[in-house]
Amino acid sequence: MTEHATEERIGDRIDPARAGALLATLGLDVDVEVGQELPPFAHHAFFWSRKTEENLALDGHPKLGGLIPDLGLPLRMWAGGRLRLHAPFRAGVNAERFSRVTGVARKEGRSGKLAFVTLRHELRQRGQAVLTEDQDIVYREATTLGGEAPVAGETPDERRALKLSNITLFRYSALTFNAHRIHYDLEYCRNEGYPGLVVHGPLMATALAMMAAERKSLKLFEFRATSPLYLGDVAWLCRTGNRYWLEGPGRRLCMTASAE
């Protein structure tokens, strides 16, 4: 594991109109007021990395070599993460996000060479720590995806449908300023080995975290992506106790999570 000291700072005013557009994308028809507490992962709609198109890689992500080192592996996916909530994240309040790479690990997997990068974001409003998010990002070679997807092995206490459309994916990409082509370019997806458009990992994590937040005030939410969810898949949000997961067709396990 290698430590990196490089830090990035981005400031943003948490615009209530944009926050309301995000909530509408998530299926909530509410007016967002100044000072209103926003749901888990709402910060993904802010702190945009405003790169011009010439500074994007072929996949639509910003080119590597700045905050995240260039590891010579072209394809990127979220592997998981941890969200620690210290105080409410509020609309209409200026905020700062401080980001740094806390670790890099190289591995050899069934699909070839892999690199796991941990990226930490710390958010503050009015000088107070609001949340800390660790993102585990995996980079891999341009090879065909391999391996069998895991299958959920238990019957949940609670199970509800997650309904997504191409409009959902389009709006979420736009609101998070995410140009990753696997979410909107079907031909690109097939060239990468995916059978269809890939649902955003943060979007799945948001759905699970919002489900958990209905039961209690969250302090910690941890999740791990286990297989892709594709647009058109039948998807279910599941819970047993404080354990959560997302199932695709045939009970394919797409994401697991825990809440405290």
Image (cartoon, rainbow, N blue to C red):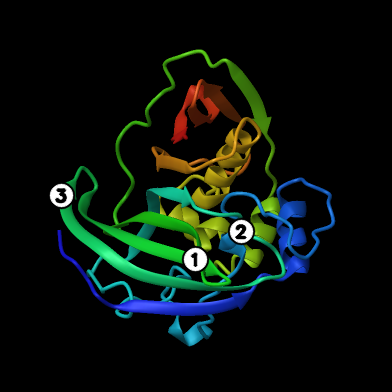
Residue 174 lies, with reference to residue 237, above or below; the image says below
Mark 1 touches mark 2? (CB < 8 Å): yes
Residue 252 lies, with reference to residue 49, above or below; the image says above
Nearer to the camera, 117 or 227: 117
Q: In this view, does 31 lie to the left or right of 163?
A: right
Q: Nearer the viewer, mark 3 or mark 2?
A: 2
Residue found at x 49% / y 44%: 195
Residue found at x 83% / y 51%: 30
Mark 3 packing: few (<14 Cα in 10 Å), some, or many (20+)? Answer: few
Read off the residue under disc 1: 123
Q: Residue 6, position in %: x, y?
A: 28, 78
Read off the residue under disc 2: 89
Read off the residue under disc 3: 108
Mark before the other along the chain sequence, 1 or 2: 2
SS at mark 1 in the image: strand
> Could you tell me if residue 200 is visible in this image?
no
Mark 2 packing: few (<14 Cα in 10 Å), some, or many (20+)? Answer: many
Amino acid type at image mark 1: Leu
Nearer to the camera, 176 or 167: 176
Amino acid type at image mark 3: Glu
